[in-house]
Amino acid sequence: MMNKYYYDFHLHSCLSPCGDDDSTPNNIAGMATLCGLNVIALTDHNTCKNCPAFFEACKRYGVIPIAGMELTTSEDIHVVCLFESLDDAMAFDAEIDSRRIKIKNKKEIFGNQFITDGEDNIIGEDENLLSNATTVSLEEAPALVSKFGGICYPAHIDRPANGIISVLGTFPETPHFDIVEINQKDKVDEYVEKFNLQDKKVVISSDAHYLENMRDKENYFEVDDEPYSSALVRQKIFEQLK
């Protein structure tokens, strides 16, 4: 039986320097239920370290979690990386941690970078700024993410900052991406036509850094979810994304 699963695959927690301190894993999961979302991905800047707590929180609220990251390439382009397995995401996190350019975070400018447990208790803090570029190039990113069992695609291509089009001035033929993310749904047709993206699957996500920026349910995947399990739904969504 096919059922609709409403999604948002681009959310930031209190670990992202530009994210609100109130955007804890439990608050994100709770807000997702209020918005009518069924499947959500946590995609903090260049880290997955709040994903374990996020998985705990989503289970408590009955929301299906996806572990992710918003990778900043060496060209300063944002790329959404999603993993079907939490273990794969954490292994990728360790790889990216070794590829970060570590500059001390200035909290008074960029904000806190809190790591929490599943109860939203602060258990750590990343002292180095998470949002700056890594040494991973755009060309390298798809193969690197795939090596860790994940998928990736350019984030918010319709935005004036850190989008692949705003940085490069066009959508490049290489590396190849099967998916693109657009932030504003009303821009889909414009960008698909202008940049010849007819062969791409379009994902629409909020890039919410504050709880109030999360959107009510609108975009969905249709999934045959019998016999139901959150793992099966996640698997079926990844099959469609791949």
Image (cartoon, rainbow, N blue to C red):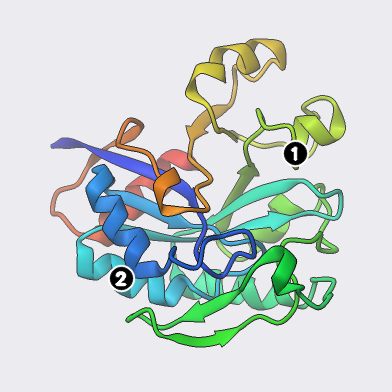
The residue that label 2 is drawn on is 57
Q: How many marks?
A: 2
Residue 128 lies in what quarter of the image? bottom right
Q: Secondary structure at mark 1?
A: loop
Q: Which label sits in the foreground, 2 or 1?
A: 1
Mark 2 to mark 1: distance in Å? 31 Å
The residue that label 1 is drawn on is 161
Which residue is at 64% across, 20% downward? 197
| Crowd rating for badge 1 (residues with CA inside 10 Å; few <14, some 14–19, many 20+) | some
Q: Is residue 168 above or below residue 111?
A: above
Which residue is at 40% across, 85% downward? 121
Q: Is residue 102 above or below residue 16?
A: below
Q: Is residue 83 left or right of residue 220?
A: right
Give percent across and percent down for residue 93.
63, 73
Which residue is at 64% across, 10% downward? 193
Q: Which tag, 2 or 1, sits closer to the chain's start?
A: 2
Q: Is residue 85 left or right of residue 101?
A: left
Q: Is residue 166 left or right of residue 234?
A: right
Q: Is residue 195 above or below residue 5?
A: above
- The quarter of the image holding the N terminus is top left
Which residue is at 41% across, 53% downward? 211
Give percent across and percent down for residue 63.
26, 58
Q: Secondary structure at mark 2?
A: helix
Give percent across and percent down for residue 146.
63, 57
Amino acid marked by disc 2: Ala
Q: Nearer the viewer, residue 210 or 144?
A: 210
Amino acid marked by disc 1: Ala
